[in-house]
Image (cartoon, grey):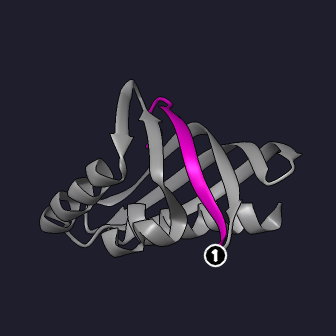
Amino acid sequence: MKAVQQLVQDVFDDVWSDYKKETLNKYHTKDFIILEHGEVWTNDTIADWCVRAAKRDQGVERINSFDFFKTEKTADRIWMAYHNYATFKGSQGESKMQWLESVIAIKTDSGWKLQMMHSTRLPRKN
């Protein structure tokens, strides 16, 4: 279960903070989807987002932290629920955001990968 917690940390650090679209196959299954605040995103959607986010990047650092509060494991599948906290630091100061999320991870020949994520953005904290 620690491996899936680390997987969540790594995907947020590499993809959502550093916009490394080339790491998607390392962390996600080919059929991965995220239900992102009312939208369905695929690996292609996320890769496109990474390209756009990198172009508009103004040097803001995103620091990710998590509070994992529920985990269920059956065979080669783990379902996990957690609070996702992001602190954004830049020349304009600091802001914070929070999401309530869940993931389904499956064990593959190359280790644990995320198959699905559900994310609900909570009101912004400044």
**Residue 3 sits in quarter:** bottom right
Q: In this view, does 7 lie to the left or right of 37?
A: right
Q: Residues within 10 Å of mark 1 (few under 14, many from 20)?
A: few
x then y, percent, for residue 102: 64, 39
Q: Residue at x 79, y 54 (%)?
A: 76
**Looking at the picture, does residue 69 appear above or below residue 52?**
above
Quadrant holding the N terminus: bottom right
**Looking at the picture, does residue 107 appear above or below residue 41?**
below
x then y, percent, for residue 87: 48, 58
**Looking at the picture, does residue 83 appear above or below residue 20?**
above
Q: Residue at x 65, y 43 (%)?
A: 83
Q: Which residue is drawn at 34% across and 74% down?
A: 22
Amino acid residing under circle 1: Ser
x then y, percent, for residue 114: 58, 55
Residue topped by disc 1? 110
Q: Is the magenta stretch mostly helix, strand or loop?
A: strand
Q: What stretch is highlighted in magenta?
A: 110-126
Q: In this view, does 67 lie to the left or right of 28?
A: right
Quadrant holding the C terminus: top left
**Residue 36 sits in quarter:** top left
| Depth order, front residue of 23/89 | 23
Disc 1 element: loop
